[in-house]
Amino acid sequence: MASGLNRRHLYLLLAIALASAAGALLLASWHLSLTPRFLLAESLRRWTTIDTLPDWLRAGDAYPDHRLDGVLRPAHPRLLPIPDGAPAIPPPNEAACDGHRAAPRSLCWLLSGDRESAELALASMAGHTGTELRPPPTAWEWALAMDWLATLPSRDPRQWRAARERTLQMALSSLEKLDDQSLSLWHGRASEAANSWLLAAGIATDAAADAELLRRSQAHFDRVIAALAITESWPSGYNYWINSRAMPLVLALISYRNSLEGNARASQIDALLERLGLWMIHSVRPDNQVQGHADEGPRLDLRDETARVIDLLVRHTRSPVLASYGAYLQSLHGDAAYYRGYRWSRRLLHDPSVPLLPGHTGSAKQAADLSIFNGHLPTAALFGRGAVNSLFARSDWGPDATFVSFRASHGFSHHQHYDAGHFTLYKGGPLAVNGSAYGATHSPHRLQYSIQTVAKNSLLLPGRPLALNTRLRGQASDSGGQRLTMPTGSRIRDPEHWRGQLHAGMHLAAAELEAYDHRPGAHAYLRADLSQAYWAEPGSRRVRRDFLYLLDEDLLVIHDALVGLPADIRPAWLLHTARRPAIEGLGRVAGSDRAGVFVGTVDHARVEAGRGSMDAGFHLPASAEITLVGGPGYEWATPERDGFYVNRDGGVRAMAGYDPARWRLEARPPRAGDTHFLVSLLPSLKGHRNRETTLPERQPKGGHVLHTPRRLLVFLDGGQLTTTLSLDGGHRELLLLGVGAAARIELTNTQGRTLTGRRGDGVASFDLDGLSGNWRLSATQAAQGDT
């Protein structure tokens, strides 16, 4: 009886244990956006000695209809061929030849003919425990080493078979993960596909089994190539790119190009590599830091990782622009430009034969700044057009330049933030900054503040239901920001799957680029419709942002049109700063005089940081209410529904590379409902500039007019605008913004003289030099959709 009872207890406990394990598996699957099959398979790989997964745990070939495109080059090395005339290295004096890692020793063999290094490396990779060398720690190093060791004559056949079998199993393991639906495209899937391709291409022969391995690997990596062509950058931020993704992805792109003859993607890859390199350059501010925007980390400082990726790009593209950027990185950080664990690879990656830009000597004594690009690179560039819409613009490439950035991106990865419409401004110091600070993925700070729109220089629409990903319910604060679609995990398989999720499923669409125009020396202009960032199906509700940087006036103007809003929504315009802005007329409503919440009706603020300062003019709405939040204990504070402010600092950590955002300015209209914001930001190095922008008292119906020292700006809002402009000869240009492609624009004076203007994407401009008197401006948009 007791024995039976104990047996029943044992069965019950076993059933409870199995049920608990299944529940934990399902909970982890749901929380991390991973399939149960993937989690179980990874557990078996990690905690058991199993070599091959059982059939019931395999997902099966994800792209069985794919056919191998191109013919594999038979000769080795094929992943990264050594350029003709590469200098040999003397084994006794080269660190790569006396270290304890297999990859450097394989390179030593390739460049110096040191057979002992090759044999030690092969023994290590074959799994021989007696060797003193450590096998390569990463898939890309392993693949390169195998490719190099394939050139070793009379190698030990048993060791080669063993090393090759280990490489094959690594590639198959990557393919099993890729065939499952769990890995996300702009995240781990991209790296795993790069690994699979490198391993397969590094060992492939003309055997049928190798051709099948290569075919499956290509099918997955082709999707990664297409994904990178969409974004032309890494949506999860620069730190994730350079620390985790850039080296295997760039190497795989180059090896794809080198390993295959007759591949249809060759020209696309060449163009993509060039664009990725330019993105890495344009995102650097005058203070030699990358402008971060997502879940960033310390490598925004350009140390350790960036130089070897740039050297790799230079090696393939032979671009003097990229080569000069590589020389700049060496001047900036010296030996620390390469992480110490990879300094052996500089001999392979750095190609000194690529010419630098004129005037760049390559000397370590040359000033480490970006002025080398003056006259060689444009002062504005847009990356990921129609998808990421990431704009960088600057007054010039010198150390005293003004630098601005803007983003209006769809959703791609859970390491992105909800920042459609976000901008930054740097001049002599960070003046308009990203308000996010570092926090672990599931930390309260990240979920309740850092990833949300409240931490960005964008717009809040409080009062509407916040569409939360189910993983955040009960955790995220409702600050009125944009929809949180995948804050803790993502599972995007390929570009087709992503496109299918833009307007259905996860509703990843957040912004539509309506216009982008760059006239060198004059302006960089972008208009984006941000409506879908706030509503999956916005209907007649519209949130548009015009972003205009006037290069010759060093002036940033931002215009927002929020129309069709529910009557109870009172939007807020956001600006984050490192230091407390100087604003007169604010009263304290919480905290102390040193830190807290301050409110008042003002139209001007001054910001300082480093050597820089900025005058902010709030032109619209009239009588805007300014709320200033910040200081110790209020750095990341947002209000609860009862109006009490709570500092969202749980799990926040100090991290190099982040601007120290400690203050947040919020501008609101006096009443809820449809709103127009018009704000000018004037940066300066030499004290504060007087506010030189003025808003005429009478504004025309269908648009808004702003006077700058050199221009009349007209932002079009509706289908029809008619107004009279009184010119006194002081303005050089009339610039209309938000102009539809088929819009009719006329500018005539009382004597019947008509001016002919220039048209760009979303803009129309007229030369006003020497003109005076009254002029009638008429603008008619062809259709509502053009506005």
Image (cartoon, helix red, strand yellow):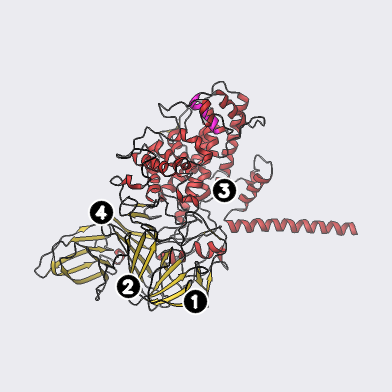
> Looking at the image, is 755 positioned above or below residue 159?
below
Nearest to the eye among marks 3 and 1: give it.
1
Q: Which residues are magenta?
A: 103-112
Query: What crowding class fits label 2: few (fewer than 14 Cα within 10 Å), some (14-19), or many (20 or more)?
Result: many
Question: What amino acid does circle 3 point to?
Answer: Asp
Q: Secondary structure at mark 1?
A: strand
Earlier along the polypeptide chain: callout 2 or callout 1?
1
- Label 3, label 2: how far apart the Cα atoms are: 52 Å
Residue named by callout 4: 521
Report the residue at 46% width, 73% height from top: 464
View extreme (top): residue: 154
**In screen coordinates, is 732 left or right of 213?**
left
Residue 785: where, in percent of width, then height?
Answer: 31, 64
Where in the figure is residue 117, as x and y percent of width and height?
56, 27
Looking at the rendered image, the disc whose residue lies closer to the viewer, 4 or 3, is 4
Residue 205 visible (yes or no): no
- In this rendering, position of residue 59 left or right of residue 596: right
- Magenta stretch mostly in which secondary structure? helix
Please give the residue where the numbered disc 2 appears in the rendered image: 620
Magenta stretch contains residue 244:
no
Q: Secondary structure at mark 3?
A: loop
User: The C terminus is located in which quarter?
Assistant: bottom left
Q: Which mark lies nearer to you, 1 or 4?
A: 1
Q: Which mark is residue 180?
A: 3
Tag 2: amino acid: Leu
Going by the numbered disc 4, the residue's amino acid type is Gly
